[in-house]
Amino acid sequence: MISHKSIVYFRLFAGSLLVLCLTALIACEREVDLRPEGKGNIVVECILTEGETQTLRLSSTDIVSASLKDAVISLTDETESTLAGRFVFQEGDQWKMDYAAKPYHKYLLTVEVDGFETVIAHTVMPERVSIQHTVLWRVWPENLEFDGFPDWELGSRYEIKSLPQGAVWVCGMNYDESSGKHVLASTIATSLESSDLFNLTGETYWNEYNPQADQRFEDLYEKKGPEDVSMVGSGNWIYHFPREFRPTMYKYVVGCPLHDTFLRIPPITEDDNRTAADPKGFFSIAGSFQGSTFGIEPSSSTDGYILFISVSEEYDRYLKELLTEESRQASMQDFASLFSRENIHGNIENGIGIFGAKTEQELPWIKHNKPGSWGNDFEW
């Protein structure tokens, strides 16, 4: 018997975040044995969303005698015991169905192809992401106790207790002018102590804003002295506040480890230490982000933002294993080592692949502030 190897590629797609790897993002290779006398395996890739249209990819690890275009692909809402609908073939390996998945509902996917056992998979739609956030974006006296915060920290903050109980994945989305689309930021860090450390870059977060702000205070107040600082018209009252009330940005993230592209917040059942140095039960996120320039919410379609993604259990495991394997392959020195790895976790019965679910929320991230009394902005 003669066998040979074939590699199935999951390509890196940094555009619209649709199906795999938080939305079809990650590049990966899978080793598969192809035997002439075998029929190959059916490969299914489907991540349910709250969007109006669901997308599925159907392929195989070998040439099959039956046409995959004639497959019957059904989605059943097991919570309501009703047929949600059937996927319709589009082109290539793409199938679509007009349907919005419902949070907390259980779903059954069945794929029927002539000559193969019925492919079956189950998932549970996670809870909707509804993270509470707050933004302090400029310096005025009334902001000294902004929403009860004891510090004068500029930027975006996110409330810990509003996180979903399950796993949450987070990434920064920057606008790319050349493509006219939002793309993934390369690094991300957080003050949240329970963040998963599986994909660290080996570096820590730092930004230029804080030392610039410190230097400005020193130049305009500490070096000159209070008698040399005008208190009328220019708003230089801010330089007379104690140091702890001088504006900073993401100071609680400074020194925290940088993660490669994604931040994984484990489910409560895995790690319930959801605490941060930020006051009032909030946490901060920063990284190589563009963010929004001014205002409390993004004001332009080209503003950057933070994407929070609540994922089903099997999808969470799949993503972590996929990213871990991708990192391991990137560090390999020889081609032979590519064939030493184990298969990535999947939940497809009588086939291979992944059937999962996710919900998403886009939230602002403020990078540049406009301190009204300073009259200029720092670049960092």
Image (spheres, helix red, strand yellow):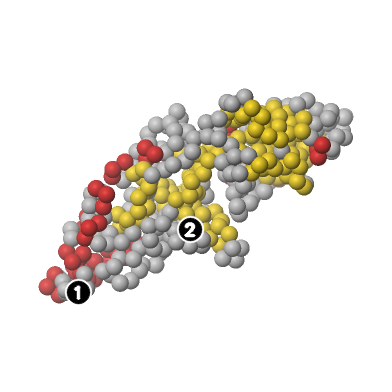
Does the rendering let one see residue 364?
A: yes
Q: In the image, which disc is placed on residue 304?
A: 2
Out of 296 and 59, give the one closest to the viewer: 296
- Residue holding disc 1: 233
Give the residue at x 45% y 30%.
270
Q: Separation of disc 1 and disc 2 at Cα?
A: 34 Å
Quadrant of residue 44 within the rendered picture: top right
Q: Going by the image, does 110 lie left or right of 38?
A: left
> Which type of secondary structure does the marked residue at label 2 adopt?
loop
Does the rendering let one see residue 343?
A: no
Give the residue at x 21% y 70%.
235
Point out the image quarter for the C terminus: bottom left
Q: Residue 183: x, y in percent?
A: 56, 56
Q: Residue 103: x, y in percent?
A: 53, 34
Out of 236 and 343, give the one closest to the viewer: 236
Q: Going by the image, does 251 lie left or right of 335?
A: left
Q: Residue 152: x, y in percent?
A: 26, 55
Amino acid on which disc 2 is placed? Gly
Give the residue at x 37% y 34%.
273
Q: Are marks 1 and 2 in contact (CB under 8 Å)?
A: no
Out of 330 and 63, give the one closest to the viewer: 63
Q: In the image, which disc is placed on residue 254?
A: none
Q: Going by the image, does 196 lie left or right of 152?
A: right
Quadrant of residue 244 within the rendered picture: bottom left
Q: Earlier in the sequence, mark 1 or mark 2?
A: 1
Q: Going by the image, does 280 lie left or right of 228?
A: right
